[in-house]
Amino acid sequence: YSALRSAFRAFMAQRKYPLAPAATFLDTCYDLSSYTSFQIPGIAFHFQGGSDLVLNAANILVVSSMSQVCLAFAGNTNAADPGIIGNWQQKTTLLVHDIPHSKIGFVQGA
């Protein structure tokens, strides 16, 4: 998580987007209330075997208001704990199982 957060923060800092207070456990938030449009970096999960889960903005951000737009990822309290792809990243995504070929795939917009 720390590498993702650092890369996201660096991208947002290059565009001079102002930080906003954290929203509970979401610690990377921005005040975008003075912008009519804004950019965010792309985020994708790459799986062994070639499947990619490419996230759209709705899977990357939690928008409580334009003055508090947060990265929709949170770190574990213990770095040894497994990472979990949360329900926010999975919403509107259909997981396709190809059992005979032992593969998975993803369809956005489901």
Image (cartoon, grey):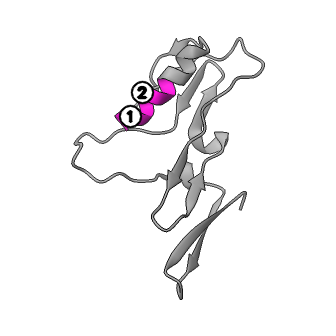
Residue 69 picture location, percent across and down: 59, 26
Q: Which mark is residue 6?
A: 2
Residue shown at the point (51%, 14%) measured from the top left: 19
Report the quarter where the C terminus lies: bottom right
Depth order, front residue of 102/69: 102
Residue 99, compared with residue 20, is above or below; it is below
Q: Is residue 7 magenta?
A: yes
Question: Is residue 32 rendered to the left or right of residue 50?
Answer: right
- Residue at the bottom extreme, as displayed: 100
Q: Whole-Å distance between the Cαs marked 2 and 1?
A: 5 Å
Q: Quadrant of residue 77?
A: top left
Residue 74 can be seen, yes or no: yes
Residue 100 picture location, percent across and down: 53, 88
Residue shown at the point (53%, 64%) measured from the top left: 50
Residue type indicated by callout 2 = Ser
Residue type indicated by callout 1 = Ala
Report the quarter where the N terminus lies: top left
Question: Is residue 6 rendered to the left or right of residue 82?
Answer: right
Residue 95 picture location, percent across and down: 59, 68
Q: Is residue 65 magenta?
A: no
Q: Are marks 2 and 1 in contact (CB under 8 Å)?
A: yes
Read off the residue under disc 1: 3
Dot 1 falls on a residue whose secondary structure is helix
Residue 26 can be seen, yes or no: no
Residue 20 picture location, percent across and down: 51, 16
Q: Which range of residues does the magenta coloring cover?
A: 1-9
